[in-house]
Image: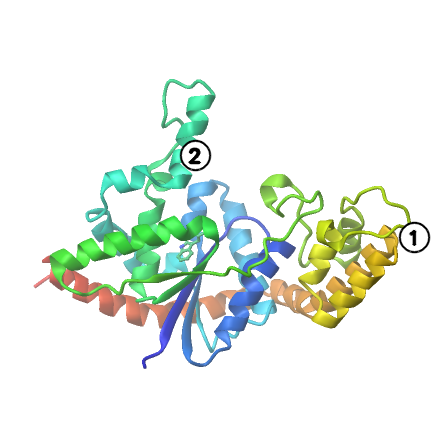
Amino acid sequence: MSKQVYLTGITTTGTPHLGNYVGAIRPSVEASRIASNRSFYFLADYHALIKSTDAALVKQSRLEIAATWLAAGLDPDEVTFYRQSDIPEIPELTWLLTCMAAKGLMNRAHAYKALVQENDESGSSDPDKGITMGLFSYPILMAADILMFKANKVPVGKDQIQHLEMTRDIAQRFNHHYGELLVIPEVVVEERTAVLAGMDGRKMSKSYNNTIPLFETEKKLRKSIMKIVTNSQEPGEPKNPDESTVFEIYRAFCDDEEASQMREDYAAGISWGDAKQRLFEKVNETLAEPREKYHQLMLSPDNINDILDVGGKKARIESKTLMDQLREATGIASR
Ligand code: TRP
């Protein structure tokens, strides 16, 4: 059987936090070590432009995210690791796909519909207020990312399932008109993928301002962990690990044995202070080495960029080949 192609993109806005690490970075790095797969990981900086017009932030975030993945153990020789914007064939393919995508299909995109609904609820007379074409046609750009490299499997969070369905729909329409040139991808939803809780117990997310930083100083890590909201149970009172954010985060970092020890200690009434201290020690021990590596990498952005340049060149060998075939098939090849 030929190798399965795994591909996933990371939108380059913001600095990765503990939730990103547990939910996306760690499982992807693990998957990339499986020799029977080919993996494509890219920094979705064209997608970042949909969310932010702050050029310095987009630039900085792309660097930080690249460094985070490398520090977490991604081996750029084993995978293709690149910037989306280094592949000019992606916007080219986006246009070919735009001509295949039904507008009605885009109207049904959850992200777009949510914004229309917000406008509606705020009493605006324009349902499309503040909505750019970039946001509206975002699923087509994402389809181009995926189809360009003939991905078979696309690991994503649940919120992205619909985009994969759209990608399949658009690709099938293309193949119907021009021949079987595009590979129809499958979504991989990591059921197990922890959606980690943040300091306030809600899902850890930048928009809730409850994130625990991944590679900031040990001191800041400790401070954030000590701020995790708990109930008011006293030391000595038995506590329920399944209703505890401290336990939930601990579980994402410890092995089975440590987890059952912690469960016992909860039952025996460990104090919140002690539980948090143990959580801090565990997370800190896990992150110490990658944190060091991250800061090393961030000292020389040129080295990071060199790695991404190489990845881009590697990726373009494939994107050029496919794009030539598609130009031929659609009648726009030069001769
Ligand atoms: N839209 C994805 C997200 O917000 C990121 C992304 C862009 C992506 N292009 C992709 C994911 C292609 C998988 C495949 O999470």
Q: Which residue is mark 1?
A: 236
Residue 275, located in which quarter of the rendered image? bottom right
Image x and y of residue 333, in percent: 12, 61
The residue closer to the viewer here, 137 or 88, is 137
Can you say whether 9 is above or below 209 in the image?
below
Q: Give the residue type at disc 1.
A: Gly
Quadrant, the C terminus: bottom left
- Helix, strand, or loop for circle 2? helix
Can you say whether 323 is above or below 206 in the image?
below
Asked if the residue at label 2 sits under 8 Å from ligand 1, the reply is no
Quadrant, the N terminus: bottom left
Q: Residues within 10 Å of mark 1 (few under 14, many from 20)?
A: few
What residue appears at the point 52 percent right and 75 percent down from the top-left corner?
75
| Label ID, residue 114 | 2
* Sequence-first disc among 2 and 1: 2
Q: Give the residue type at disc 2.
A: Ala
Image x and y of residue 153, in percent: 38, 65
Q: Left or right: where does residue 85 sit relative to residue 263? A: left
Q: Is residue 290 visible?
A: yes
Q: Is residue 216 visible?
A: no
